[in-house]
Amino acid sequence: MKRNERGFTLIELVTVIAILGVLAAMTVPKFFSLQTKAKVEVENQIIGSIRAGLETYAANKIVQDGTKTYPATTTALLSEVLNPSPAEWKFTTGASEGTIEHTRTDSLITWTYSTTGSDYTIGTRVAN
C-alpha cells in the first residue's frame, strides 16, 4: 500500500491554527481601541464644524448688523448654524448655558455652550 505524501499532517494544521489564534488575540484589542479613538475623532470634527459654523454665523452678523454676535441659545445654534444637525446629537438650553449632547451606544458625551453675545465658549468633552 502506497502512502499519499501530498497534504498536511494534523500537527502542521494545529500549529498554523495556534499561530493564527495568537495573532488574533494580539490584534483584536488594538482594533477595538482604534474604534473608540475613531469615535472620539469624529466627535472632535463635529465640534470643530460647530466652531467653524459659529464663526461664519458671527461674520454674517457683522455684515448684516455691524456687530459680532453668536447664537444666544443652543436652540438657535441648532437651527441657524447646524442645519441639519448630525444624527444622535441633541442640543438643550438651560438658564445660563446650553448643552450639546451626543448619545453613543457606549456612553453619553456632553459639551457646554455659553455665550456673552460677542464671544462664545464650548466646554471640554465630558463622558457620562
Image (tube, rainbow, N blue to C red):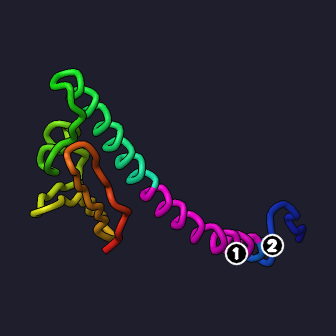
Q: Is residue 36 left or right of residue 43?
A: right
Q: Amino acid at mark 1?
A: Val
What's the distance in space between the residues labelled 1 and 2, CA to CA? 16 Å
Q: Which mark is residue 12?
A: 2
Q: Amino acid at mark 2?
A: Glu
- Total numbered circles: 2
Q: Main secondary structure of the magenta part?
A: helix
Residue 90 % position (x, y): 18, 56
The residue shown at (33%, 60%) is 123
In depth, the one of 62 and 100 nearer the eye is 62
Q: Earlier in the sequence, mark 1 or mark 2?
A: 2
Residue 19 % position (x, y): 74, 72
In depth, the one of 3 and 121 nearer the eye is 121
Above or below: residue 28 compared with residue 121? below
Residue 46 % position (x, y): 35, 47
Above or below: residue 93 compared with residue 80? below
The residue shown at (58%, 69%) is 28
| Quadrant into which the N terminus falls | bottom right
Instruction: Kindly state the secondary structure of the residue where label 1 is placed.
Output: helix
Q: Which mark is residue 22?
A: 1
Q: Can residue 33 be found in the magenta stretch?
A: yes
Q: Tell me where residue 18 sits by quadrant.
A: bottom right
* Residue span colored magenta: 16-40
The residue shown at (38%, 53%) is 43
Residue 101 % position (x, y): 24, 60
Q: Residues within 10 Å of mark 2 (few under 14, many from 20)?
A: few
> Mark 1 or mark 2, which is nearer to you?
1
The residue shown at (84%, 60%) is 6
Above or below: residue 49 compared with residue 4? above
Q: Residues within 10 Å of mark 1 (few under 14, many from 20)?
A: few
Instruction: Kindly state the secondary structure of the residue where label 2 is placed.
Output: helix
